[in-house]
Image: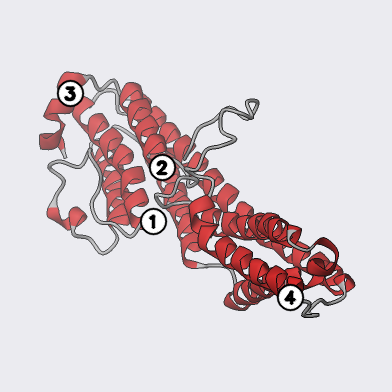
Amino acid sequence: MIHYDPHKWLDHFFDIKGSLVREISVRVAVCVAWAGAVAYAHTRHIDISIPPSIHGLVGTALGLLLVFRTNASYDRFWEGRKLWGGMVNETRNLVRSAGVFLAGDRVLLHRVARWTAIFPYAAMNALRGAKGLGPLADGAPDEVVNAQHPALAVAAKVTECLNEARSKGLISDIVFTSIDQNVQLLVGYLGGCERIRKTPLPFAYVVHLRRALFIYCLTVPFALVQQTGWVTVLETLLISYVFFGIEEIGVEIEGPFGHDDNDLPLEDICETIHKNLYALAGIDHQDQEALPEGL
């Protein structure tokens, strides 16, 4: 994710990175070249113009389609951010509670904190279709690393640690159920993220929008050339840039868990969780070096 100051216009006005100019440049160039050909034909006294009222009506419908597309994509983006915000809160609550009830067993507390800190990294990799448990997983057992769903295996390890604490008499059944509820919520947040990732916008809607958008931008010179002549090229550049840009923004943000410039900063969120949990559990630098044997 690109961080910026929304109050400063000129600082990012001419930025290319993250603005999707590269992604839409070919489509815009095709429309502009086509507009140039239409304007040239008009100068040769070939009557190829069409009534502009037709494009006015179609443009209104197309604008509504683009608004719906962008809103639907942003809803997915914001829902993903809320789910990861919930993940931050639940990991903190889990280790905060564990720090109180497992204060008598420092080793077990550190295991709970570390497995909980590994969970967001494992969830991030799962959402990106990657393997691994992240930078905190040195010494993790093979059954977790090679599990069918490593993030769920990590959640099971957290519950296993809590069950060990219950067996040692450090926590009661009620406390175990209360703390494990945080683990269940973490799994639920991951499931919500997977729902977003695996359920794209309906195919028919996306295809129809793109067809209508491309046809509109290719035919708009015919509606303008009678009145504006060669200026039609510039007008087509503006219209195609705006319309294709809006559609591409929807594409960019509808899957917020990837590596794109406008995706969620999952690495930063995972690092924040890691630092918060280790601080809550009182894990210092020396403790971190000894943690692989504590898994």
The disc at residue 287 is 3
Question: In terms of secondary structure, where does tag 1 sit?
Answer: helix
Mark closest to the chain's N terminus, 1 or 2? 1
Please provide percent x and percent y for residue 206: 61, 72
User: Do tag 4 and tag 3 residues touch (Cβ < 8 Å)?
Assistant: no
Residue 236 makes an appearance in the image = yes
In this orientation, which residue lies closer to the viewer: 61 or 152? 61
In this orientation, which residue lies closer to the viewer: 280 or 30? 30
Q: Amino acid at mark 1?
A: Leu
Provide the residue designation for mark 1.
Answer: 127
Question: In terms of secondary structure, where does tag 4 sit?
Answer: loop
Left/right of residue 165 with respect to residue 218 in the rendered view: left
Q: Amino acid at mark 2?
A: Leu
User: Do tag 3 and tag 2 residues touch (Cβ < 8 Å)?
Assistant: no
Please provide percent x and percent y for residue 106: 22, 25
Provide the residue designation for mark 2.
Answer: 266
Q: How many marks?
A: 4
Rendered-image quadrant of the C terminus? top left
Left/right of residue 208 with respect to residue 117 in the rendered view: right
C-alpha span from label 4 to label 3: 81 Å
Question: In terms of secondary structure, where does tag 2 sit?
Answer: helix
Provide the residue designation for mark 4.
Answer: 44
Mark closest to the chain's N terminus, 4 or 1? 4
Quadrant of the rendered image containing residue 219: bottom right
Please provide percent x and percent y for residue 137: 20, 42
Quadrant of the rendered image containing residue 203: bottom right
At x 78%, y 79%, the residue is 48
Q: Residues within 10 Å of mark 3 (few under 14, many from 20)?
A: some
In this orientation, which residue lies closer to the viewer: 43 or 264? 43
